[in-house]
Structure formats: C-alpha cells, structure tokens
Amino acid sequence: MIIIHHLNNSRSQRILWLLEELGVPYEIKKYQRTSEQLAPPELLKVFPLGKSPILTDTGVDGKENITLAESGAIVEYLLKFYSTGKFNSAQSGQEYIDNLYFTHYAEGSIMPVLIQKLIFTLIPQRSPWLVRWLLNGVFGKVSSLLVEPELKKHSDLVESHLSRKTFIAGGSEPTSADFLMIMPAEMLEAINIAGPSTKEYVKRIHDRPAFKVALQKGGEYAFSGF
C-alpha cells in the first residue's frame, strides 16, 4: 500500500494528482504547517529531512518497504512501477528531450528562484512592524535587482515552450515533466508574471478530473484558485 505523507500548501499536491491519474490505491497522512509555515517535526520521524512529499510503499505483497522523498524521485518511481505505459514520454526524439529537460528543470532551476521570491516577500510581512518598512525596502530592492530579472527569463522560457505545446513533452497526455512543472506554472501565475499560454496550461491541468479529485483529497492548497 502506498502512503503519501502530505503537507498542506506543498509540492506533495502534484503527487496526489499523479496517483489519481494512475488510478492507484493510496492513503494520505496529512500534516499541517506550523505558524512559521514550516513542516511540523512529526515529518522528521518519517524521513530525516522532515520535508514533504514522502512516499512509503509496502508493495503489493506487503513484503517490500520503501521510503522515498523528493518530488522528482517519487514521480519517476510511480511511473516506473505503477504505470502501464500511460503518462510516459517517447524514448527518443524531441518529445523525449523536452520531457527530460523540464522534468529536471522544474526543481533544479525554476523552483529555487520562485522560493527566493517567496522568501523575500514573506520575511518583511512577518517582521515586527517597527522594522517592517526598512525590511520591505531592503528585500524589495534585492528582489528587484537579483530575483525578478531571473524570474522574467524563466517565465519567458516557459511561456515560449507552452505556446507551442498542449503538454510539456508535446504529446496528448501529461508526462513526468507536467507532474513536476504544474506547481512552478501555478506560482508564476500567482505572482502575476505568467504569460497567456502558461495560464491556459494551468487551467488545462486544473480542469482534469483527476486533479480536481486530488484537490478534494489533499485539502488546503494555495494555488487551487487559478
């Protein structure tokens, strides 16, 4: 049996979407962020880094126990062992290259910049009011000089690619790249720098029945309204 250790407003929402698309039975163990918006210490008992998502799998015969973290690794694992070929990209040609690149680009390139933007926004908001004006100025300046130009490059890259594709790899169904890229695309829309093709892509994913079911099961997710 698969168990997803699921944190509200986190990357694990896209793992629930993949499981719903695959039609694989699974259970959700839910965790709530602390008042500081951090993962609770209970997750440290599941995996040493205490982050979500975490997958545990006892296997179909209940004999093999697996604990796996990292969104990309979990997506790869589920597609390898629980897909009958559906949602896998072609193994050669441009479709393979696009899927390979964006599967790794999602967490390796664009998410770190998006997290920087989030941190530079949240720190002033949560600081004591006496210094909030100062931190707003400092962090705003750093963001405008260093983070926002990088985000513009990423936004343009994603928009250019999606202007020619229904799904990331170019096929008629999502692949691993889509299961990982949906959150960066949602975040680009949330901070108002997503282009029209990116917005259409997010809506296309959100309209899928499996995504809607995953949202109902997962609960609180900040990007469900786009």
Image (cartoon, rainbow, N blue to C red):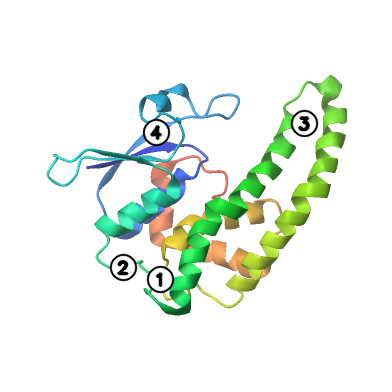
How dense is the environment of label 2, judged by Cα within 10 Å: few (below 14), some, or many (20 and up)?
A: few
Spatial distance from mark 2 to mark 3, Cα to Cα?
45 Å
Kindly identify the residue that appears in the image at 66 percent across and 51 percent down: 190
Give the quarter of the figure containing the C terminus: bottom right
Relative vertical location of residue 103 with respect to residue 60 in this rendering, above or below: below
Q: Looking at the image, is mark 4 or mark 2 nearer the viewer? A: 2
The image's mark for residue 173 is 1
Rounded to the nearest angstrom, the CA distance separating label 4 from label 1 is 29 Å
State the residue position of label 4: 30
Is residue 207 visible from the viewing direction of this image? Answer: no
Under mark 4, the amino acid is Lys
Q: CA distance from mark 4 to mark 2?
A: 28 Å
Residue 147 image offset from top left, x and y in percent: 75, 48
Q: Which is nearer the N-term, disc 4 or disc 1? A: 4
Task: Name the side, left or right, on which 52 lies relative to 149.
Answer: left
Tag 1 near tag 3, CB within 8 Å: no
Q: Determine the secondary structure under disc 4.
A: strand
Q: Earlier in the sequence, mark 4 or mark 2?
A: 4
Give the amino acid type for the residue marked by disc 1 in the picture: Glu
Q: Which circle marks residue 86 in the picture?
A: 2
Badge 3 marks a residue whose secondary structure is helix
Q: Are marks 4 and 2 in contact (CB under 8 Å)?
A: no
Q: Splitting the image into 4 quarters, where does residue 12 fall?
A: top left
Q: Which residue is mark 3?
A: 124
* Within-10-Å neighbours for mark 1: few <14, some 14–19, many 20+: some
Q: In the image, is 222 to the left or to the right of 100?
A: right
Instruction: Name the N-terminal-most of marks 1 and 3.
Output: 3
Specify whether residue 174 is in view: yes
